[in-house]
C-alpha cells in the first residue's frame, strides 16, 4: 500500500500558499496499492484519513476508469455520511456532515468484465476543505494512479470445455442390437450395449454403447448414448439431432444438424453442418472440403478447433482452439476464440506466430462487422476485415481493406498489417489500441494509440499518439 500526502494544491485564506509536508505529517493520508491484479472481477481499496488538524466540511473522491478495458460495477464506503454516485464514479461527504480530525474512510471499488491483460491506469482525485473554509486541499492533476490489470488473456472464460455424459440404463435393458445392414429403430428403450444397422432411428432412448449406421441416422433425439455415433460414408445424420448427450464422437458421412445437445468428443461432417446451436462439444468441429457450417453457429462451446471447408456465421459462442474457415466469416459477434481466427484457409502450425500470412490465403472476408469478440491469437483474412469493440491479442492481418469502426476501443497486441493495395481506416469515433505497420494506405479519422508505419499514404484528421507520418 502507498501512503501519501503530497498534494499539489494546499491553500489558505486569501489564497496564501501553505507548504506541503511529508507523508508522516500529511494533511490527508491516502492509502492505496500501486498495482492490483483484479482478474476478471475483483476490487481495490482507497483509504483517506484526515490529519489536517481541522474538521473537514468537504471531502470528495472522483475516479476515472475510462482507460480500463473493464467496468467499475460498484463503489461502496465503510463510513456513514458519504453518498456514492456510481455513474459519475464519485464519493462525496454529505452537505450536512463533518469529517473529524483523525477520521478515516475506506472506499471499495469493484471491477468486472475485464478483457485486457496489461496494466492500465485508474486515475483518482481527492478534494478537501476545512469546515471553516480556511484550508483547501486537492491532489495533483490529473490525479493519483493505480495500475489495474484484468484477466490474464491466455484462454477464454469457459475453456477448457469438458462435457460430462453419464449413461445409466435400466436393469431390464435389452442387450446389443446388431441388424447388419437392415434398418433399426430404437424408441423409448434402454440398450445395454451397441446398436448397429443400416438406416437407424434413435429417439427417447438410453444406450450404453455406440451407434453405428452403415446408412443414415434419420432421427437422433432426446437420447443419451455412451459411445460414438456415426452414419455411413456419404450418409446424413438427418433431421436435426436435438437434445442428445453423446459420450464420444458424432460423425456424419455427409450432412448433419444439431441443437440443444452435448457431444463429449469430436463433431465431424463429411458435408455441411446446417445447424449448430446451443451445444457443447468437447473436441473439434470439422466439415468436409467445401462444406459450410450453414445457418449460424450460435450459443455453442467448443473445446477444440473449428475447421470449416466453406464459410460460416458465428455468434454468442466460445471456441477454445483455432477458428479456421476456407470461405467467409459472414457474422462474427460476441464470441471468444482461444487461438487464431482465419478466413481463407491455410495451413495452421503449432506455433500460431507461424500462421501463413494473409496474402497467401484465399480471397475471404471477415465480413459484416466483427463486434464484441475476444481473439487470443491473430485475426487473419485473405481479403477484408470490418471490426468494432474487440480484443485481438496478437495481430490483425488482411490482404484487403481493414476498417475499425466506432464503439469501444479495438485493442490489438502488436500490429495491424494490410496488403500493398489496401487501405486501413480508423473511422471517426473509433479507437485502435495498437501499432500499425502496413504496405498500403492509412486513413485516421479516429484515434490510434500507437505508432503508424505505412508504405502508402497516411491521411485523415484523427489523432495518432505515437509516430505520426503526417507530421
Image: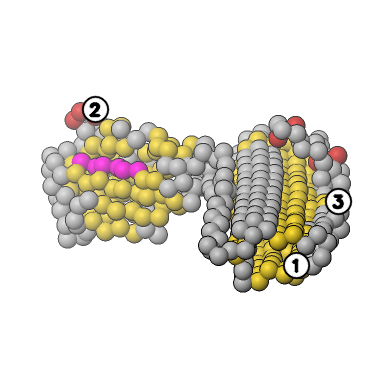
Kind of element beneath mark 2: loop
The answer to whether one can see residue 281 in this image is no
Q: Earlier in the sequence, mark 3 or mark 1?
A: 1
The structure's colour scheme is secondary structure
Q: Which residues are magenta?
A: 44-49
Q: Nearer the viewer, mark 1 or mark 2?
A: 1
Query: In terms of image quadrants, where is residue 13?
Result: top left
Position of 102 relative to 233 (above/below): above
Q: Is residue 303 magenta?
A: no
Q: Which residue is mark 3?
A: 289
x then y, percent, for residue 373: 62, 52
Q: Which residue is mark 1?
A: 184
C-alpha span from label 1 to label 2: 86 Å
Q: Which residue is mark 2?
A: 22
x then y, percent, for residue 450: 63, 37
C-alpha span from label 3 to label 2: 72 Å
Amino acid at each position: 500500500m502507498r501512503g501519501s500526502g503530497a498534494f499539489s494544491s494546499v491553500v489558505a485564506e486569501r489564497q496564501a500558499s501553505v507548504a506541503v509536508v511529508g507523508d508522516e505529517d500529511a494533511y490527508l493520508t491516502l492509502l492505496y496499492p500501486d498495482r492490483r491484479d483484479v482478474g476478471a472481477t475483483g476490487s481495490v481499496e482507497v483509504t483517506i484519513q484526515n490529519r489536517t488538524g481541522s474538521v473537514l466540511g468537504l471531502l470528495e473522491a472522483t475516479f476515472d476508469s475510462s482507460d480500463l478495458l473493464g467496468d467499475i460495477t460498484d463503489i461502496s464506503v465503510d463510513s456513514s455520511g458519504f453518498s456514492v454516485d456510481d455513474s459519475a464514479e464519485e464519493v462525496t461527504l454529505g452537505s450536512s456532515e463533518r469529517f473529524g480530525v483523525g477520521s478515516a474512510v475506506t472506499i471499495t471499488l469493484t471491477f468486472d468484465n475485464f478483457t485486457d491483460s496489461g496494466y492500465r491506469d485508474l486515475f483518482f482525485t481527492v478534494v478537501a476543505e476545512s469546515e471553516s473554509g480556511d484550508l483547501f486541499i486537492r491532489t495533483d492533476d490529473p490525479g493519483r494512479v493505480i495500475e489495474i490489470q484484468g484477466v490474464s488473456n491466455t484462454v477464454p472464460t469457459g475453456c477448457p470445455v469438458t462435457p460430462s455424459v453419464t449413461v445409466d440404463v435400466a436393469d431390464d435393458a435389452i442387450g446389443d442390437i446388431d441388424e447388419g445392414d437392415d434398418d433399426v429403430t430404437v424408441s423409448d428403450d434402454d440398450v445395454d450395449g451397441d446398436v448397429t444397422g443400416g438406416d437407424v432411428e434413435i429417439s427417447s432412448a438410453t444406450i450404453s454403447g455406440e451407434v453405428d449406421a452403415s446408412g443414415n441416422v434419420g432421427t437422433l433425439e432426446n437420447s443419451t448414448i455412451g459411445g460414438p455415433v456415426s452414419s455411413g460414408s456419404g450418409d446424413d445424420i438427418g433431421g436435426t439431432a436435438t437434445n442428445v448427450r453423446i459420450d464420444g464422437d458424432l460423425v456424419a458421412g455427409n450432412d448433419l444438424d444439431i441443437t440443444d445437445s452435448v457431444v463429449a468428443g469430436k463433431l465431424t461432417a463429411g458435408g455441411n453442418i446446417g445447424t449448430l446451436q446451443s451445444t457443447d462439444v468437447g473436441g473439434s468441429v470439422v466439415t468436409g472440403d467445401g462444406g459450410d457450417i450453414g445457418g449460424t453457429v450460435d450459443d455453442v462451446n467448443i473445446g477444440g478447433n473449428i475447421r470449416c471447408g466453406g464459410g460460416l456465421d458465428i455468434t454468442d459462442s466460445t471456441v477454445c482452439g483455432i477458428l479456421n474457415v476456407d470461405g467467409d466469416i459472414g457474422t462474427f459477434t460476441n464470441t471468444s476464440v482461444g487461438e487464431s481466427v482465419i478466413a481463407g484457409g491455410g495451413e495452421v502450425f503449432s506455433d500460431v506466430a507461424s500462421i501463413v500470412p494473409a496474402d497467401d490465403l484465399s480471397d475471404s472476408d471477415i465480413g459484416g462487422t466483427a463486434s464484441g469478440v475476444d481473439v487470443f491469437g491473430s485475426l487473419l483474412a485473405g481479403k477484408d476485415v470490418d471490426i468494432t469493440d474487440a480484443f485481438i491479442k496478437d495481430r490483425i492481418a488482411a490482404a484487403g481493406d481493414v476498417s475499425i469502426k466506432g464503439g469501444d476501443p479495438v485493442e490489438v497486441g502488436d500490429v495491424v498489417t494490410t496488403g500493398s493495395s489496401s487501405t486501413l481506416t480508423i473511422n471517426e469515433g473509433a479507437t485502435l489500441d495498437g501499432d500499425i505497420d502496413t504496405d498500403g494506405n492509412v486513413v485516421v479519422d479516429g484515434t490510434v494509440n500507437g505508432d503508424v508505419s505505412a508504405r502508402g499514404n497516411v491521411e485523415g484528421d484523427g489523432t495518432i499518439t505515437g509516430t505520426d507520418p503526417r507530421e
